[in-house]
Image: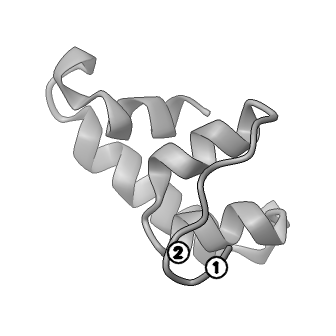
Amino acid sequence: MNYLKIITKPTAAPKGSLTQALQKLDAMLKDPAYDLHPRLKHFLENRSYEKALIWIDGNEPEKGICGK
């Protein structure tokens, strides 16, 4: 997901793209048409963007304080 890469590495992203990426991910969370996997939705709701990227890549991120 390019938006996650922009957020996790903002210095490498074009100017203004960080704000756009955050807005797009927030919009995706609100739009049921995206039908996000519950685990991905959890990461995005908690702004755990690095964990989301790790999970998308097929790896298991470290558990946080919520246990997920």
- Quarter of the image for the N terminus: give it: top right
Circles 2 and 1, Cβ within 8 Å, touching? The answer is no
> Left of 21 or right of it: where is 18?
left
Residue kind at label 1, given as amino acid type: Gly
Camera-nearest label, 2 or 1:
1
Question: Which mark is on residue 45?
Answer: 2
Q: Position of residue 42 (x, y in %)?
A: 64, 73
Count residues near mark 2 (Cα–Cα under 10 Å), then give few for <14, some for 14-19, many for 20+: few
Q: Position of residue 53 (x, y in %)?
A: 60, 39
Q: Position of residue 12 (x, y in %)?
A: 24, 15
> Left of 31 or right of it: where is 21?
left
18 or 37, nearer to the observer: 37
Q: Position of residue 35 (x, y in %)?
A: 85, 67
Point 38% across, 59% down: residue: 23
Point 55% across, 64% down: residue: 44
7 or 52, nearer to the observer: 52
> Left of 65 or right of it: where is 6?
left
**Numbered disc 1: secondary structure:** loop
The answer to whether 41 is drawn above or below residue 53 in the figure is below
Question: Which mark is on residue 67?
Answer: 1
Point 35% across, 36% down: residue: 8
Residue kind at label 2, given as amino acid type: Glu
Question: Which mark is on residue 41?
Answer: none
Q: Earlier in the sequence, mark 2 or mark 1?
A: 2
- Quarter of the image for the C terminus: give it: bottom right
Q: Residue furthest bottom?
A: 66
